[in-house]
Amino acid sequence: MIDFLFLDKGKCYCCKKDEIYKYHLCENCLRKLDYMDSKYDLCGNICYSIYFYDDFMKRMIWDYKFNRNTSLYKVFSEMIYDFIIENNLSGFDYILGSPSSKQTIKNRGFDHIRLIVEDVAKKLNITYLDDLKKVKNTKAQHTLDRIERKKNLSGAFCIDKDLSGMRILLIDDLITTGNTCLEIIKELKDKGAREVVSLSLASERGKRR
């Protein structure tokens, strides 16, 4: 069961004090976000990131994932939806969020990425690719060195579905090294996907405007 925090009607979902301005955030909180709007190459794959992963964005994502401020999924889904529309990212057969393992979902109490991406999928009227599973419990990537990170994710994702010729939009909250995206893309392309475009809410990669 998802625990939506009580919020006064019309109040910012982040600071919970000031009036909503956009994306369920007040003008002051929105100004603290570092809009990056970056497009870059990830080993031959197109990748987009919306915001820079600065201290304020870190606090928002932490609050959402670990403090159960699950109302923030509406903030993030609207940001992602607007970015997709403004950048004309269309023609995809499927959309999906980077999946978490069953153990992670059990520990956290909800699937934080799926909650966001299902809302985006509904707005776009696009099918959510429900078949990709994370079948391996992995260690936190930031605790590992470059070689260990690749080993950690090897074989972590699996899909039993023919994706021949499909274009897929992959969404995650954060991209750092890109290893998670690449492992998912590899699995999707092994099943025939023609193109996988990645979009992250936040990133330390790419160029800031």
Image (cartoon, rainbow, N blue to C red):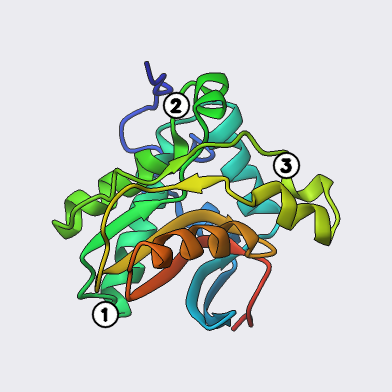
Q: Which residue is mark 2?
A: 110
Mark 1 vs mark 3: give the one in front.
Answer: 3
Q: Secondary structure at mark 2?
A: loop
Image coords of residue 160 (percent x, y): 33, 47
Q: Residues within 10 Å of mark 3 (few under 14, many from 20)?
A: few
Residue at the image position 48 percent from the left and 54 percent from the top: 172
Q: Secondary structure at mark 1?
A: loop
Q: How many marks?
A: 3
Depth check, front residue: 80 or 112: 112
Q: Residues within 10 Å of mark 2 (few under 14, many from 20)?
A: some
Q: Earlier in the sequence, mark 3 or mark 2?
A: 2
> Residue reaching furthest right?
145
Identified by mark 3, the residue type is Ala
Identified by mark 2, the residue type is Phe
Label 1, label 2: how far apart the Cα atoms are = 30 Å
User: Where on the picture, by quarter, is residue 90?
Assistant: bottom left
Label 1, label 3: how far apart the Cα atoms are = 33 Å
**Can the viewer see residue 13 in this picture?**
no
Q: Which residue is mark 3?
A: 140
User: Where on the picture, by quarter, is residue 162?
Assistant: bottom left
Q: Earlier in the sequence, mark 1 or mark 2?
A: 1
Q: Which residue is mark 1?
A: 88
Residue at the image position 31 percent from the left and 31 percent from the top: 9
